[in-house]
Image (cartoon, rainbow, N blue to C red):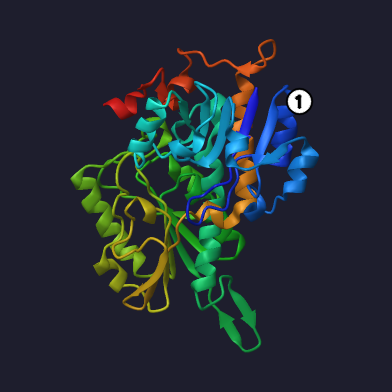
Amino acid sequence: MKIAVLRETATGEKRVSASPETVRKFAALGASLAVERGAGLSASVSDAEYEAAGATLGDRATVVKDADIILCVQGPDVASLAGAATGALIVGGLSPFGERARVDGYAAAGFEALAMEFMPRITRAQSMDILSSQSNLSGYKAVLDAAAEYGRAFPMMMTAAGTVSAARVFVMGVGVAGLQAIATARRLGAQVSATDVRAATKEQIESLGAKPIFVEAVKGIEGEGTGGYATEMSEAYQKAQAELVSSHIAKQDIVITTALIPGRPAPRLISDAQIATMKPGSVIVDLAVEQGGNVEGAVAGEIVEKHGVKIVGHRNVPSRLAADTSALFARNLYNFLSAYWDKDKGAPLLPDDDEIVKGIRLTQGGKVVNERLLG
C-alpha cells in the first residue's frame, strides 16, 4: 500500500497533509510513504525529517506513480495524478461545491475522492474533522490579526498616568472558530460578547466568561442545525437580529464574524450602514470572506478601510499558522484512514453503508455518488 503526500500548489497554501509523526504511524500499519520534495518546507518540516520518519522523497510523478492513496490539503489537478493506481483514494480538503468540475474529473479518471470537509459531525468522527481542527486555530488567529490592526491595547491597564479601558470584542457566530475567538480575546483581557442564531450556544458563551447577545422576541434555532451547523433563519429573525446587532455593534472596538452555511454563500451579518456607526479605529475580521463574506465591503485577501474601520479579509487563515494546522490536519487524515485499516489486507476497507464513508465519498466506480452533489 503506497501513500503519496503531495506538495501543495494552490496560491498561498502553506500546509502539508502529513507530518513526520503520521508518516511513522502509517509505516507502522505497513504502508510505504512517498513524499514530494519540499512538501513540508512552508510548514516548517524539512525533507530530512520525512526521510528520518521512513518516507522516500521524489518529484510529483515519482511520488504519484502506483500510489494507492493520495493525501492532500487542497485537491490536486487530475492531470498531475497520472500514473496513480486504478481506483486510488484521494483524501483531503477537496472543495466539492467550489471545484465541482475537478470532482467530475476524479470520477472520470476512476479515482475514489474522499472530501474530509464533508465529515459528519458525529462523536466517532470528531478526531477526523478537518473543519473543526482548522477552525479552532482560525478563531485564535483572527483575534491576533485583530490585535495587530487595532491601534490600542486589549486589557484594561491601570497606570500612574491613568487607566486604559479594555477593548470591547464582539464575536458573531459561535461555532468552533467563534468559541476559540472568545477564549483568546478573554485571555488577552478584552471585554467579550457574542451572538449566534442557535440558542444552544448561549450557555457555551457564558461558560467562557463572555456576554451572550441574543434575540429574545423572535424564536431562533433551539438546538443545532443539520450536522451541527447553523441554517438560514426566517426573515423575522433576521430583521430582529439586525436591529439588535446595530445597537450593540456601535459600541464595539473589534468584531469577528465566523458564520458559514455549507454549500451556500456566507450570510450577510454586517451592513455598510452598521460599519458607519462604529468608532474610527475599530477593526472587523471576516473569517467567511472567501465564501462571500459576512461583512459588506470585505475583500478576500485584503485589508480595506470603510468609515474609518478596518475590515480584515485574509484568505486561508489556517495556512497562516501552517506548522500547527498541518500537524492537526495530518492527524485528522491518519485518524480516518487508520480507523478503517484492515491489518490482513494492509489497506483501508471502506464499507458502503458506513455513515462516515457515505458522508465523505464523492466519487466511486467512475461516477459522482455523493447525495449532496446530486441533489
Q: In this view, does 165 lie above or below 243?
A: below
The picture places residue 114, in percent across and down from the top left corner, at: 48, 28
184 lies left or right of 105: right
**Which quadrant of the figure has residue 186?**
bottom right
Which residue is most to the bottom? 161
Residue 120 in sight here: no
At 46% from the left and 13% from the top, the residue drawn is 352
The picture places residue 313, in percent across and down from the top left corner, at: 41, 62
29 lies left or right of 191: right
**Which quadrant of the figure has residue 123?**
top right
Residue at the spot of label 1: 28
Mark 1, Cα crowd under 10 Å, few <14 / some 14-19 / many 20+, is few
At 49% from the left and 60% from the top, the residue drawn is 192
14 lies left or right of 247: right
Of residues 329 and 281, the one drawn nearer to the viewer in this rendering? 329
The picture places residue 164, in percent across and down from the top left corner, at: 56, 79
